[in-house]
Image: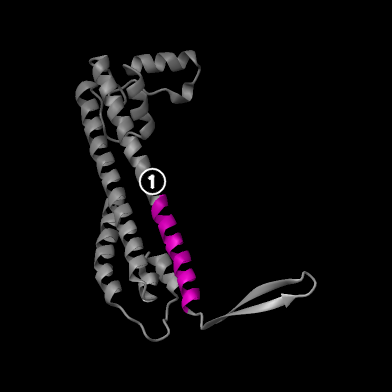
Amino acid sequence: MGKKQIVTAIVISQVLYTQQLGSAVDDQKPLISPVVKSLALPGWGEYSLDNQIRGRIFVLSETVLLLAILGSYSVAQRQETEYKAYAAEHAGIDPFGKNRQFWVDIGNYSSLFTFNEEHLRWRDFNALYEDNDTWAWAWDSSNNRERFENTRISSDTWRLRGSFLIGGVVLNHIVSAIDALYLSKISNIQETVVSPNYNPHLDKMELSLTVYF
C-alpha cells in the first residue's frame, strides 16, 4: 500500500471517528488512559474527558494535516510522471529503472556525452553512465531541459513538504496526549483549600494552596 492510500485511509477513519467521539460518554473508569487515546488518535482523549471543544480542535488539525499530506504527495507524483514523460519526449531517454540521481543529472547536462566527458576530467569514474540506449540522453533544446529541471525540482519540493507535514502529524499526537494528561489531572481535583498563614520570621502574611485529588 502506497503513501497516498495510507493517508486516505487515515483521513476516512478521522471523519468516521469524529461522530463517535462526540457522542461517547463514559461514566465508568476508562479501560484505556485518555493519554493513550490521544496519542493514538488526537482528540479522542479530550472527548473521553468530556471536553468536546478541545477534542474538535485536535481532530480538525489532524484532518487538515492529513489532507495536506495527501495533496502534497499527489502533486509530487503527478509532476514526477509529467517530467519523466517530458524527458522521454525531448531527451530520448528510457524512463524505466532509473534512480533519482539520474533524473538530477539529465537536468544539469545536455547529453550523456557532455556528462561523461566532464566527469572523466574530474576523474569521477564511479559517476559515469554506460554509453548505450538504456542510459543515453540528448536534449533537443536548452529551454526544454530547463523546463524539465524546474518541474523535477517542484516535484521534489512538494514531496519534501509532505515529509514536513508528517512531522506535524506526529507533533499533533504528542501535544494532544499532553493536553489529555493535563485535563485528566484537572478533572481529578476534589477540593482546593486556600489558607492564610503568618510568618513571624518575615513578619508577613502568606497564603498556602492545598489541592486534594
Residue 1 shows in the view? no
Residue in the picture at 78% in, 75% down: 200
Q: Residue furthest bottom?
A: 28
In the picture shown, does residue 40 fall above or below 100?
A: below
Estimate how packed mark 1 is, as few (under 14), some (14 to 19) or many (20 or more) residues with alpha carbons within 10 Å. some
In the picture shown, does residue 99 fall above or below 8?
A: above
The x and y percentages for residue 193 are 58, 81
Q: Which residues are magenta?
A: 167-187
Q: Which residue is mark 1?
A: 163
The colour scheme used to paint the residues is: one colour
**Image position of 82 (left or right of 100):** left
The quarter of the picture where the C terminus appears is: bottom right
Which is more toward the observer, 130 or 140? 140
Q: Residue furthest left?
A: 89
Q: Amino acid at mark 1?
A: Ser
Q: Magenta part mainly helix, strand or loop?
A: helix
In the picture shown, does residue 89 fall above or below 198?
A: above
Res. 13 image quadrant? bottom left
Which is more toward the observer, 131 or 156? 156
The quarter of the picture where the N terminus appears is: bottom left
Res. 85 image quadrant? top left
In the picture shown, does residue 52 fall above or below 64?
A: below
Q: Residue furthest right?
A: 201
Residue in the picture at 41% in, 81% down: 30
Residue in the picture at 25% in, 44% down: 74
Residue 18 shows in the view? yes
The x and y percentages for residue 57 are 34, 61
Q: Is residue 79 magenta?
A: no
The x and y percentages for residue 142 are 27, 15
